[in-house]
Image (spheres, rainbow, N blue to C red):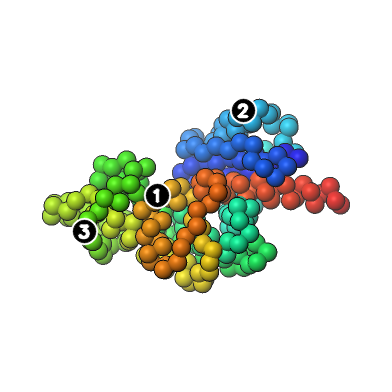
Amino acid sequence: MIVAGCDIGSLTSKAVILKDGEIMASRVMRVAGSPRQTAEKIMTLTLEDAGLAMEDVDYTVGTGYGRKQIPFASKVESEISCHGKGAWWSSNTIRTVIDIGGQDAKAIKLDEDGKVIRYVYNDKCASGTGRFLEIMADALEVPLEDMGKIAGQATEVIDMSSQCVVFAETEIVSLVNDGKEIPDILKALNRAMANRIVSLAKSIGVEQEIVITGGVAKNIGVYEALEERLKMPVQHLKVDPQINGALGAAVMAGEMLASQKVQ
């Protein structure tokens, strides 16, 4: 059985192909053009990686902001359901999923069977999202992928009072002008981001085990700031955290196909 999941987000697109429940291929790329064009491009590339054609895929589930524009999706599902399912595939002991996307942040609570029982999300403000870090990286002229590593060199604790992107950018300029070091400012940004996300997560009750998904999960500085703020360990997924939504979509595709065959 070959199934696929395609997650078209606000900033990146992801695709995963599963064969008999195991990952054959996966891809992450920036959104380019319309959601439909992006979906077709990333699926074509992922199929090439797997040595397959679209007709070899038995069932596909789409998710993400652009899910309704995925032309080859057999069905579409919410990001909440797919992120929960993807995390559960990695480990059935996970109870809390914190997904930090490009334009929003979500906290998802799972029961012992991996079903979503509570969730909350913030899509009204860029703070606590991947876009927040992108804007701050540009302001500090630091490569986005190096933010966590550079923050690890911090020697001074700085408290940032602003969580709004506009005010945070202004505050960064002031800190730079005051002679503060870039690593110290980056660590302060990570802590400010963690404060925002933890407030969101605590509104539904945080239980162990906890994982972070989304591209921001690759930032070790955010990981450490979240652990510090939660006072709990945060686990690492056994797969690229950025593909988790697409992975969950593919897992759901397998379950839907199996259900059809049983019927």
Q: Relative to the observer, which residue lies in front, 168 or 198?
A: 198
User: Label 2 amino acid?
Assistant: Glu
Give the alpha-carbon distance from disc 2 to disc 3, as whole Å: 48 Å
Tell me if mark 1 has few (under 14), some (14-19) or many (20+) residues whose alpha carbon lies within 10 angstroms of its own: some
Residue of label 1: 219
Q: Secondary structure at mark 2?
A: helix
Q: Earlier in the sequence, mark 2 or mark 3?
A: 2
Q: Secondary structure at mark 1?
A: loop
Query: In percent of the image, x 72 and y 47: which residue is there?
Result: 254
Residue 106 shown left or right of residue 223 in the figure? right
Can you tell which quarter of the image residue 195 is in? bottom left
The answer to whether the residues at label 2 and label 3 have Cβ atoms under 8 Å apart is no
Residue of label 3: 156
User: Label 3 amino acid?
Assistant: Glu
Tell me if mark 3 has few (under 14), some (14-19) or many (20+) residues whose alpha carbon lies within 10 angstroms of its own: few
Query: In percent of the image, x 70 and y 45: which residue is there?
Result: 21
Query: In percent of the image, x 67 and y 49: which residue is there?
Result: 251
User: Label 1 amino acid?
Assistant: Asn
In this view, which residue lies farthest toward the left? 178
The answer to whether the residues at label 1 and label 3 have Cβ atoms under 8 Å apart is no
Residue 8 shown left or right of residue 55 in the figure? left
Measured as percent of width and height from the top left, residue 102 is found at 44, 49
Can you tell which quarter of the image residue 57 is in? top right
